[in-house]
Amino acid sequence: MSENEKILRLKQVMERTGLSRSTIYVLIEANDFPSQYKLGARTVGWFESDINGWLQSRKRARENNV
């Protein structure tokens, strides 16, 4: 993580991944998606690099299964 790392909120993560809120949390519980970070009492976010890494791993997995 760099000093300038961007933090994505749930709506942004949903837009980037195409996943619904419930699917994201199901995948987190299954350890198949990056965990969120607590930003405040009722606020969470994800590091952009974690989401980008997850997307890249999904892409590589798909390419290897073709």
Image: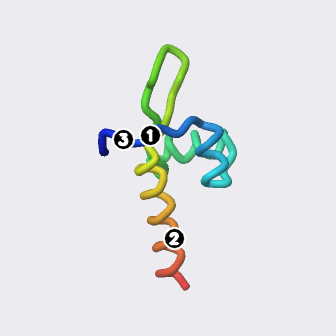
Q: Which residue is mark 2?
A: 59
- Kindly report the distance in space between the C-alpha atoms of the residues bearing marks 1 and 3: 20 Å
Give how far across and how far down residue 48 sits, in percent.
Answer: 46, 47
Picture coordinates of residue 38, whole percent (x, y): 44, 25
Tell me how far mark 2 sits from mark 3, CA to CA: 25 Å
Inter-mark Cα distance, 2 to 1: 19 Å
| 63 w.r.t. 46: above or below | below
Q: Answer few, some or many: residues within 10 Å of disc 2's Cα (few below 14, many 20 plus, some between 14 and 19).
A: few
Mark 2: amino acid: Lys
Q: Badge 1 is on which residue?
A: 35
Which residue type does callout 3 highlight? Asn
Residue pointed to by mark 3:
4
Is there CB contact under 8 Å for labels 2 and 1? Answer: no
Name the residue: 61% across, 54% down. 17
Q: Is residue 26 left or right of residue 46?
A: right
State the residue in front, 3 or 24: 3
Q: Secondary structure at mark 1?
A: loop
Quadrant where the C terminus lies? bottom right
Residue 11 image position (x, y, % from top left): 65, 39
Residue 18 lies, with reference to residue 13, above or below; the image says below
Residue 62 vertical placement versus 58 (above, below): below
Give the number of the disc on residue 61: none
Q: Earlier in the sequence, mark 2 or mark 3?
A: 3
Name the foreground residue: 42 vs 7.
7
Q: How many marks?
A: 3
